[in-house]
Amino acid sequence: MSKKAVWLSSMSVSRVFLILLVLFAFMTPVFVFKATATDGEDAASSAIKKAEEAMVLAYQAVLEAERAGANTSGLLNRLNVAGEYLARAHILYRVGDLDDAARFADLCFENAEKVKPEAEWLGNTARVESGVRLRFTMVGSVLSVCLIGVAGFLTWRVFKRRYYRRVMRMKPEVASDES
Amino acid sequence: MNLEDHRTLFAVTTLGLVLIAALPTVSMVVSVPSGAERFSELWVLGPTHMAEGYPFNVRVGEQYRLFVGVGNHMGYSAYYVVYVKFRNQTQPLPDTLNAVPSPLPPLYEFRAFVVDGGTWEVQLTFIFLNVSRLGNSSFVSEMSINDVVISMDSSSGWDLENSGFYYQVFFELWLYDTSLQGFQYHNRFVGIWLNMTM
């Protein structure tokens, strides 16, 4: 192989290498950006999902407390604040603002997480209170029924005695029939 | 009145008093379902918080205001989502007969927890940011709802009968169903027509 041929061959190898290097330098940010975007999308999506689950659990706890007779208006107000954050997270996710979407989803999660144990505590307290109230009412009702029964029986006895006495005091009269 | 009559009167009176005494306990143990109808309300009010003065002739860059409200008569505290959607005259509305929502994607949403017998209301402001016209069609490509800029792709042809480019902003009500563990379209929607002026 002549000197010129060797020089040309080494030249083409270095040129190809240079072109590949430039291409790699240009393509790398594209791949990195795409991978980062996908990561951001996944992070926002999972944060929203987590927040949604927390909201549903908190709401179910509030409903349970409500059924037990607790006043849940304060908890509902706080859930409304969490709901605003969650709605915002969904909207921002749709428009592609993934960082803020994840931030609002996290805020929602924090709020909903705090509501759930309070709702459970409120529900348990309401259940205990309603149990005590039911027991008191039952005792009151049973005592009242007994009292009415005894009073009715005694009153009836007194009334019956007086009734017989009045009947005994009555004198038979013979009506004259002068026609 | 003989003794038998007196005895009957006594027995009936005593029984009546016993029932009255037992009533508080019975009412706490036995729950009678109310026959009231379960439903939700959805409304939209104009900028003066009245059912008047709704925006109609709209243009780019101007801010318009509405109030959206929900009333709960479901018998329990309900969890709602209100979706804000945008359509032209040919795009589908929700199907009220089959309780199917519009297939259009929501642009914006609100989430609300409303106590039974209570109401919830929120303000909504919107601005059209990018509207263009090409021949007999107008194109809305960007609007802002409550300060969130939303890219969209909606177009409307010129309505010869009513002389305008008509669009509709409408609101769908969805309710969280605890038994299905998800939101269901609650078959309520309300909207306003807009005439895009250039």
Image (cartoon, coloured by chain):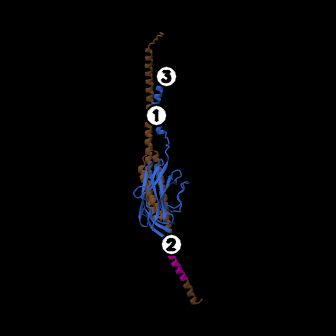
Chain colours: A brown, B blue
Q: Mark 2 vs mark 3: same chain?
A: no
Identified by mark 1, the residue type is: Ala
Chain name for mark 2: A
Looking at the rendering, the stretch of residues picked out in magenta corresponds to A13-28
Up the image or down, A17 lies above or below A64; here it is: below
Q: Which residue is mark 1?
A: B22
Q: Pick whichever, A172 or A149, lies toward us.
A: A172
Q: Please, what is the three-letter code of the amino acid marked with disc 2?
A: Val
* Left or right of residue A95: residue A7: right
Which image quarter: residue B59? bottom left
- Residue B56, position as x, y percentages in the image: 44, 62
Mark 3 neighbour density, 10 Å: few (under 14) some (14–19) many (20 or more): few
Label 2 vs label 3: CA separation? 104 Å
Q: Are marks 2 and 1 in contact (CB under 8 Å)?
A: no
Disc 1 chain ID: B
Task: Label 1, secondary structure: give it.
Answer: helix
The residue under label 3 is which amino acid type? Glu
C-alpha gap between disc 3 and disc 1: 27 Å
Which residue carries the number 2 mark? A30
